[in-house]
Image (cartoon, rainbow, N blue to C red):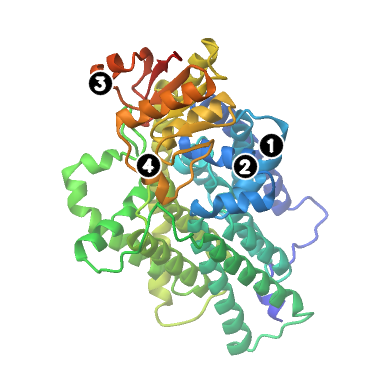
Amino acid sequence: MFLQFYSQPPVPQTKEPDFPLRQDKRNLYYAIGVTTLFLIVGGYGAAHHEMWRDEIQAWLLARDSTSVFDLLANMKYEGHPALWHLCLMPLTRITHSPIIMQVFHLLIAATTVFLFTRYAPFHWIHKFLFTFGYFALYEYAIIARNYALGMLLITIFCVLYRERYKRFVWIGIVLILLSHTSVHALIVAISIGVALMVEYLYFYCCKEETLTGNRLPIWLGFALIGIGIVTAILQLNPPSDTGFAVGWNFNLKIERINNITKIMTQALLPFPKAVVGFWGRNRFNDIGLFQLIRLPLCHLIFFWCILRFMKRPTALVTYFMATVGLLAFFYVKYGGSIRHHGFLFITFVFTSWIYYDCPEIDRPFSRISALAQKCFGPVFTVLLIVNFLGGMTAIRMDSQHIFSNAKRTAEYIKEQGMQDMIMVGHGSPPASTIVGYLEKDRMFYPQGTRFSSFVRWDRARGNIVTNEDIVIKAEQLSLQHTQNVLIILNYVLGEGLIEQYQLMFLNSFTGATIGNESYHLYLLKTN
């Protein structure tokens, strides 16, 4: 039977408690213990992490959108679907403090950890190393972004995969949600959807397996996957006046292809340097020998994975499409950062998970594939050890050094009783972080010539304004409202301009991990 082909054999009934049951209990206790430890370490890391503009941007969008439709309209410049922001909207109605977002995000990451340690078919050491690795512990737990939600949904898919044809509607729902977390998760969702379709058609039609029961839920699941993909793509279609990551790069250049391919090592070996600006800086890149072998290493890992998965087409199609799709996106649209590149690592891990439940094909290359799979344990161990060291380094550096100066700046503004003043913030992304921490409704952004809280990534935001233009606009606002105006810049004004407009320098906050989230405050007094 088709369902029997994918089902696990029944557990034999015995008078004494069987080994699978005891093993299941041990897995549960282990998952609870690791998740508890994760919450302790992650809670410490989150408490010492100052959120930066991308984290606060999502919060402000959710906070200041009056309805779901208003949020979708505000999201059209973001380049991501709106699921994360929709999850934040109820939280913003409870409090305007973005700290609740950090708590919510950490709980999402902890849920992923519990499911992974509970159900993943890996050794307990691998589960531990993954949990406290760079992506699970830091990038997708401490930094509150939409990517953690995608990682959780991929994990839920892996849990459901073993009995997928009994729960295919749930598979469809999970992949709908996954498609709406980020553009990178959308690429993964498309890959999974295609692989499931290939698996279903090949093993049902060609292998002549008999499918018992109602087939409608399976086709309904595929319909849900298609709906999720299409609606996410429609939501990602940018407006004509978008001002971020404009255009596509379809010019084939060997040097660029090689540079994009090297991103694989950034994702699989995330080991940040132990310096203030650690984020996105890999210490392996400073090793001359590593630079020589980096490109061949990427090719070796990719083709080794292809060999591993050859006898299990579902894993093969998923891995190939997701990996090539992500690299192609980095090439033609936006090269991204470590948070985006991490989906290459997640793809490697989750395809290695579902591998054990994928149907096999018997072909002459099966022996080569089996031999490649035997290398998985040692390779996986090395990759996870590097990830673990990277996670520990990131947590230590983030706790020892200020990630963004926005929180300190906002605290100073509150201490001086200036939080209700009119504020002019040049360099709208860095300035918007302060708006979030101040729980303020808006600030004037000279680049877009408008009052706003969140950043609108349109062409108007790219307008060039001089330092004098900023001060003149602040002076106009001061005269219009008969109030002092606080000017917030991420650079120092010249002495001549300060004297000409009689500005009062208040304070500077510098030396953060995010370099341009340093702030210099000037007061323009009304005449």
* Distance from Cα at disc 4 to Cα at disc 1: 36 Å
Classed neighbour count for the residue bearing mark 1: other residues with Cα under 10 Å, few (<14), some (14–19), many (≥20): some
Q: Amino acid at mark 3?
A: Gly
C-alpha gap between disc 4 and disc 3:
46 Å
Q: Is residue 7 left or right of residue 338?
A: right
Amino acid beneath label 2 = Ala
As helix, strand or loop, the secondary structure at mark 4 comes to: helix
Q: Is residue 425 visible?
A: yes
Question: At which x and y percent is residue 69?
Answer: 67, 53
Earlier along the polypeptide chain: callout 4 or callout 1? 1
Say which residue label 2 marks. Answer: 62
Does the residue at mark 4 contact the one at mark 2 (Cβ under 8 Å)? no
Specify which label sits upstream in the sequence, 4 or 3: 4
- For marks 3 and 1, the one nearer the N-term is 1
Q: Which residue is mark 3?
A: 494
Q: Is residue 306 left or right of residue 15?
A: left
Q: CA distance from mark 3 to mark 2?
A: 37 Å
Q: Secondary structure at mark 1?
A: helix
In this rendering, which labeled residue sits more in front, label 3 or label 2? 3
Q: Which residue is mark 1?
A: 91
Query: Taking 493 as reference, is 285 above or below it?
Result: below
